[in-house]
């Protein structure tokens, strides 16, 4: 396959994954956005985490909350747990990599806060431990997953929301995760600013 044919194939697969996700994810994304609005309206914060490309997604989300998305509004309270290299390396060094997010959730989390946990496989142990820590702190969880939801899906509790991308390729799932994050930001802004249509 030549380079341009390969590029077209990647685009086609990305488009197909997004089309499959559109119907499946409209309801859980709306549910996740409602949970975010409720939390933010009650002065709670949203923490986000993920590994690799999903760490980038966690930061992408928090920056759109803290700064702005598409509309002018005050900054919203959000913290990406992926950014402080001193904290991350010391937890990984003194305890273990699996605790890098959970320890931060236990330190910063308060009842009513939310955790946005992002994993394409749903099987990253540091995310599973972060979800367990969030539950200990009486926080809700919004999980962006893929494939069969992995062990993360089994770790979620009744009030949590799973947004599971129908797909098996990490890259394609990540591309839909970013779209989901932008939908969440869009819905949060519209609800907070009272935009009707
Ligand atoms: O961005 C990519 C692949 O597209 C990688 O960096 C990928 O995020 C990493 O391999 C992650 O460790 C995968 O973790 P997860 O999505 O299974 O939780
Ligand atoms: Zn990637």
Image: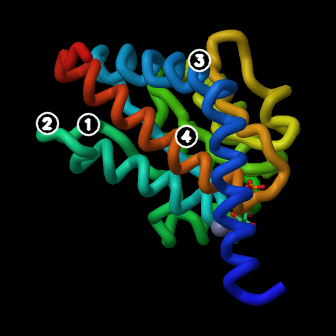
Q: Earlier in the sequence, mark 1 or mark 4?
A: 1
Percent x, y for residue 115? 54, 34
Q: CA distance from mark 1 to mark 3?
A: 24 Å
Q: Is residue 40 above or below residue 176?
A: above
Q: Earlier in the sequence, mark 3 or mark 4?
A: 3
Q: Which residue is mark 4?
A: 105
What quarter of the picture does the C terminus occupy?
A: top left
Q: Which colour assignment does the render follow?
A: rainbow
Q: Are marks 2 and 1 in contact (CB under 8 Å)?
A: yes
Q: CA distance from mark 3 to mark 4?
A: 27 Å
- What residue is rendered at 71% in x and 31% in y? 132
Residue 80 in sight in this render: yes
Front in this rendered view, residue 191 or 139? 191
Q: Which residue is mark 3?
A: 27
Q: Earlier in the sequence, mark 2 or mark 4?
A: 2
Q: State the SS at label 2.
A: loop
Q: Which residue is mark 2?
A: 73
Percent x, y for residue 153? 80, 30
- What residue is rendered at 64% in x and 19% in y? 160
């Amino acid at each position: 396959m030549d380079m341009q044919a390969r590029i077209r194939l990647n685009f086609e697969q990305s488009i197909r994954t997004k089309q499959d996700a559109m119907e499946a994810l409209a309801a859980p994304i709306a549910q996740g956005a409602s949970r975010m609005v409720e939390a933010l309206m009650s002065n709670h914060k949203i923490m986000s985490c993920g590994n690799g490309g999903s760490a980038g997604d966690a930061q992408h989300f928090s920056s759109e909350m803290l700064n702005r998305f598409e509309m002018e509004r005050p900054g919203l309270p959000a913290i990406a747990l992926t950014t402080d290299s001193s904290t991350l390396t010391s937890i990984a060094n003194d305890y273990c990599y699996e605790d890098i997010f959970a320890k931060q959730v236990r330190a910063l989390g308060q009842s009513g806060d939310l955790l946005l946990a992002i994993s394409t496989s749903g099987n990253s142990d540091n995310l599973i431990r972060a979800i367990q820590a969030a539950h200990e702190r009486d926080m809700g969880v919004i999980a962006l997953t893929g494939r069969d939801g992995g062990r993360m899906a089994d770790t979620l509790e009744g009030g949590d929301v799973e947004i599971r991308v129908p797909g098996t390729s990490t890259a394609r799932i990540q591309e839909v995760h970013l779209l989901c994050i932008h939908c969440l930001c869009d819905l949060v802004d519209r609800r907070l600013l009272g935009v009707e249509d």
